[in-house]
Amino acid sequence: MVEQVDKAHTFLEEAGTVMKQRAALRDKPEGERSMEAIVSTFNALTGKGLTEAEGWEFMILLKMVRGRQGNYNRDDYVDLAAYGGLLGECVSSKAVVEVTPGDGRVRT
């Protein structure tokens, strides 16, 4: 008997699809981006200084822990891929990026 293996690219593709669906559901063309508001509210309630990036890292850790508990749940890994993308978007939006003329290399 051959078992079905979920290939890496399918998690990424599904994460993209889910993110687009959530964008339509939340009626925001750029997608659902609530982490900044969540972190701001959390910080106001607790007096902490969590950053938006740390909020995404928290969600990644949540999915990693859930993935180790109980039976395999594909959704944990789809969400993990999406949160990784959202963390990358968050960090890159705050990075200073320089493109060297001529070689096209990007440096941060």
Image (tube, rainbow, N blue to C red):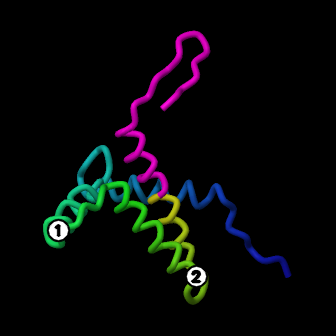
- Residue 14 shown left or right of residue 10 in the figure: left
- Note whether 11 is above or below 105 in the view shown: below
Q: Which mark is residue 47?
A: 1
Q: Amino acid at mark 2?
A: Arg
Q: Nearer the viewer, residue 37 or 97?
A: 97
Find disc 2 in the rendering and name its residue.
68
Residue 96 picture quarter:
top left
Residue 36 picture quarter:
bottom left
User: Where residue 48 appears, x then y in whole percent?
Assistant: 22, 66
Instruction: Please check the rendered image and state whether residue 59 is part of the magenta-colored stretch, yes or no.
Output: no
The residues bearing labels 2 and 1 have C-alpha atoms spaced at a distance of 31 Å
User: Where residue 25 appears, x then y in whole percent?
Assistant: 28, 59
Residue 4 picture quarter:
bottom right
User: Where residue 14 appears, x then y in whole percent?
Assistant: 53, 59
Q: Secondary structure at mark 2?
A: helix
Q: Residue at x 46, y 66 (%)?
A: 60
Residue, far left = 44
Q: Amino acid at mark 1?
A: Gly
Residue, far bottom = 70
- Note whether 63 is above or below 19 in the view shown: below
User: Where residue 31 appears, x then y in whole percent?
Assistant: 32, 50
- Residue 27 shown left or right of residue 57 in the figure: left
Going from the N terminus, do you reach mark 2 or mark 1 first? 1
- Residue 46 shown left or right of residue 10 in the figure: left
Boundaries of the magenta span? 84-108
Instruction: Please check the rendered image and state whether residue 95 is part of the magenta-colored stretch, yes or no.
Output: yes
